[in-house]
Image: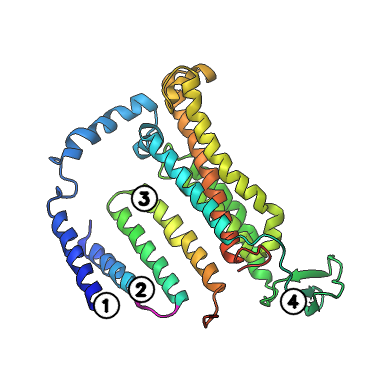
């Protein structure tokens, strides 16, 4: 069975490689894509949308439907992970671990005993005992704000440089994951709760869809941002640039929230008490 | 582009790809997959697709490796059934 599998894989692999020989060479100026499709966007993107980064303009404006349903796919992935992994109802573990901060002594307290009051002296720690590490916590506390600032820059500056909603959203999500890893998962729940993360998943898609629907309401096609010019009182070219920004913000929110939801559910195996 | 660098990167991509599916340890597979993603990111950047390279670096090499490691952390050495 195993040799049969290898034979099938090799057969189809070589067939695929053989088929790629029919492709035009990389960067061939005579290829159909370089003859008809690319020049249209390269020559007219700047005057139609005033967005210097053509990739962003094609992604969010000319191929707006594509990106919208990509966002819906990401949203669906996050919601599916939530429904598959989340265990509803609290499962109390056998015991809890506390650390006495001034002395560094670790306490294990059984489920029925009364836990120490959460104060400056005691902090609850994960069952997989983690040493108190001031270096990791402090350096992550310094890194996280810059990480988030860079993510906002990537989203807002996607018109002019590589980047945009997807990349910026991932970096925003990664900063929250860094916070959750360097402290613990319970503390990150107080910053972005599970309910808020799931709500933000839907909010991003909603922002995208509403931006598209505004075009319809103002008497143009769905996802035609040029129609927003009457709403903002600018010319249609600037309105298309603004529309791309709104859409990118929606994508960024969804991607960030989905990344956080995935991390919360995967790292705590759906119990949402403690994780990596 | 310098073809020697491209060749080295392509070789590392293939080695990491084969290593990720053959290695027994799950954590090792996750790390190798992260290395594979990072080399793919370099390849995208060499080919001039900077947006794709950016996405590959943040999603492939960054967050998905973290998600894999977080999931491996929840698995046990032996199966329960």
Instruction: Work out whether mark 2 precedes mark 3 in sequence or the reverse, and give the earlier one.
Output: 2
Q: Are marks 4 and 1 on the same chain?
A: yes
In whole angstroms, how far apart are the C-alphas of marks 2 and 4?
37 Å
Kindly identify which residue carries mark 4. A94
Magenta stretch contains residue A150: no
User: Mark 1 sits on what residue?
Assistant: A2
**In screen coordinates, is A167 left or right of B70?**
left
Label 2 Cα neighbours within 10 Å, binned few <14 / some 14-19 / many ≥20? few
Question: Percent position (x, y) of residue A185?
Answer: 66, 63
Q: Can residue A164 be seen in this view?
A: no
Say whether marks 2 and 4 touch (CB < 8 Å).
no
The local crowd at label 1, few if under 14, some if 14 to 19, many if 20 or more residues have their Cα within 10 Å, is: few
Q: Distance between the residues labelled 1 and 2?
A: 15 Å
**Which secondary structure lies at badge 4?**
loop
Q: Gap between marks 2 and 3, in whole Å? A: 24 Å
**Residue at 54%, 35% in the rendered image:** A207
**Are the numbered discs 2 and 4 placed on the same chain, yes or no?**
no
Q: Are marks 4 and 1 in contact (CB under 8 Å)?
A: no
């Amino acid at each position: 069975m195993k040799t049969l599998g290898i034979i099938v894989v090799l057969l189809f692999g070589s067939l695929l490689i053989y088929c790629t020989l029919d492709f035009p060479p990389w960067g061939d100026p005579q290829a159909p894509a370089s003859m008809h499709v690319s020049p249209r966007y390269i020559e007219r993107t700047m005057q139609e949308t005033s967005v210097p980064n053509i990739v962003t303009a094609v992604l969010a404006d000319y191929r707006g439907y594509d990106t919208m349903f990509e966002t819906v796919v990401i949203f669906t992935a996050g919601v599916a992970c939530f429904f598959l992994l989340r265990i509803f109802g609290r499962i109390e573990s056998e015991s809890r671990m506390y650390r006495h901060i001034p002395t560094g002594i670790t306490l294990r307290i059984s489920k029925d005993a009364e836990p120490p009051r959460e104060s400056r002296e005691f902090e609850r720690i994960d069952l997989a005992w983690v040493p108190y590490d001031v270096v990791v916590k402090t350096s992550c506390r310094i890194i996280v704000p810059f990480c988030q600032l860079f993510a906002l820059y990537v989203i807002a500056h996607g018109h002019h440089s590589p980047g945009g909603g997807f990349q910026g959203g991932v970096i925003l999500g990664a900063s929250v994951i860094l916070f959750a890893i360097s402290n613990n998962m319970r503390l990150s729940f107080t910053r972005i709760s599970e309910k808020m993360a799931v709500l933000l998943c839907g909010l991003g898609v909603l922002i995208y869809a509403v931006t598209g629907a505004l075009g319809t309401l103002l008497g143009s096609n769905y996802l035609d941002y040029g129609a927003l010019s009457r709403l903002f009182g600018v010319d249609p070219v600037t309105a298309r640039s603004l529309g791309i920004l709104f859409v990118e913000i929606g994508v960024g929110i969804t991607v960030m929230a989905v990344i956080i939801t995935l991390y919360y559910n995967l790292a705590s195996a759906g119990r949402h008490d403690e994780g990596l | 582009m310098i073809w020697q660098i491209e060749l080295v990167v392509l070789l590392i991509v293939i080695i990491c790809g084969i290593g990720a599916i053959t290695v027994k340890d799950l954590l090792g597979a996750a790390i190798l997959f992260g290395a594979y993603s990072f080399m793919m990111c370099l390849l995208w950047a060499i080919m001039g697709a900077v947006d794709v390279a950016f996405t590959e670096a943040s999603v492939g090499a960054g967050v998905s490796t973290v998600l894999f490691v977080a999931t491996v952390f929840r698995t046990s050495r032996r199966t329960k059934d």
